[in-house]
Amino acid sequence: MKIVLIPGDGIGPEIAESVKNISQAMKLDIDWVTFQAGAEYAQTTKEVFEPGLVEAIKKYKWALKGPTATPIGTGFRSVNVALRQQFDTYANVRPIRSFQGIDSKYENIDLVIIRENTEDLYKGIEYMVNENMANGVKLITREASEKICHYAFEYARINHRHKVTAIHKANIMKLTDGLFLEAFRSVAKNYPDIEAQEVIVDNMCMQLVLRPETFDVLVAPNLYGDIVSDLCAGLIGGLGFAPSGNIGDDYRIYEAVHGSAPDIAKKNIANPSALLLAFALMLEDLGMPNEAQHLRNALASVVEEGKNVTLDIGGTASTTEFTQAIIEKL
C-alpha cells in the first residue's frame, strides 16, 4: 500500500529514514510516497507544502509526518494545524507509556490524551483591535465537542479502559468550556459502563504530577489537550517517546510530538523513537496489531538494555546504530 511520508524539518529526514529502514526490515508491504513541507522547504520555495502533497493525502488517505518548524510571531501558520484542518482530523490521540531504562520519576504510566483537533483558539481567528490591543477568538461548538467526547468513550470501550476524564475551565469560561462540559456530560450518559470524571485544567496539571496512575483516558479541548499532553510526556522522560495520531473520518496523519531540533540536525544523533511509535500506532490502525506490538517490544528492549541508545537517553549510539539495534531485535 502507498502511504505519504513527510520527513519535515531539522532531524525529520534522519528519523524518517529510520522508519523506512525498519518498515523494510519488517517486510511490510508499504510504498512510501515522499513530499516536503515546513520551514526549510518554505525558505527556498516560498511554499509551505510541496505541490501534490494535499492531493496525495486525499488519494492515499494515510500519512506519516516528521517534525516541522513554525515561525514564532510571524510567517506562516503551523503545518500541523493546517493539515489537521484541511483533512478534518478531529481527534488527536497521544498515548503516554513508560519505558524501562528511561530516567523518570514515575513508573508504569499508561495514559491516553484525546484532544479535539480542529477548533478552540487554534482556529487562528485573531485580529488587532488597535495598535495596542489584540484579540483571539476561542471557538467551541457543540458538534465538535460531542464528536471528540464520543471518540474518547469509544476508544475507552474498545481498548478496555475504564475511565474518561474531561479537562476544562468552565468555572471561568462558562460559555465556551461550559459548552464542552455540557457535551461531555451528554455523551457520558450513553456509556454507563465507563466512569466519567471532570477536572479543572489547572488542578488537572497538579493531579497528574501527584498521582498520574489514577487517570486513564483524558479528553480535552484543543489548547488544554496540547499543554497537558506535553506535561504527560514529561512523566515518561520527555517528548522523545511521545507519538501522536491525527484521526478523521476519512484521513489519518501520524506524527512525532516533538520539534525539529535544528541544533542536532544532520549529525545522526537524533532519537527516532517518537516517530517509530507513531508508525506503530499507524500499523495498529491498519489492522496489523501484532506487527505494531513487535516493533514496540523491540524498541523497548533496546532502550531497556541501554547499550545502543542515543545521547538524549544516556547513550552514545548514532541514529543509525540505534535503528540497527532495533532491527536486530526484530
Image: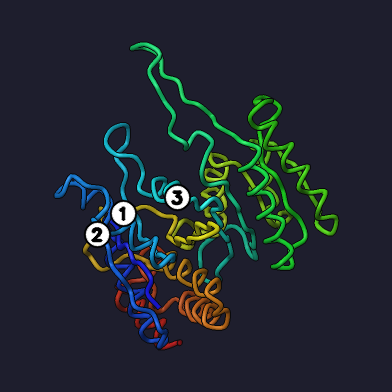
> Going from the N terminus, do you reach mark 3 or mark 2 first?
3
Alpha carbon separation for disc pair 3 and 2: 26 Å
Estimate the x, y position of residue 68 in percent, counting from the top left.
32, 52
Which amino acid is tagged 2?
Ala
Vertical placement of 275 versus 292: above or below?
Answer: above
> Going from the N terminus, do you reach mark 3 or mark 1 first?
3
Vertical placement of 73 versus 257: above or below?
Answer: above
Check if mark 2's residue and mark 1's residue have beta carbons within 8 Å.
yes
Alpha carbon separation for disc pair 2 and 1: 6 Å
Vertical placement of 68 versus 285: above or below?
Answer: above
Residue 176 relative to residue 236: left or right: right
Alpha carbon separation for disc pair 3 and 1: 22 Å
Mark carried by residue 261: 1
Which amino acid is tagged 1?
Ala
Mark carried by residue 84: 3
SS at circle 3: helix
At x 40%, y 84%, the residue is 29
The answer to which of 4 and 19 lies nearer the viewer is 4
Label 1, residues with CA under 10 Å away: few <14, some 14-19, many ≥20: some
Q: Nearer the viewer, mark 3 or mark 1?
A: 3
Estimate the x, y position of residue 14 in percent, counting from the top left.
28, 67
Mark carried by residue 265: 2
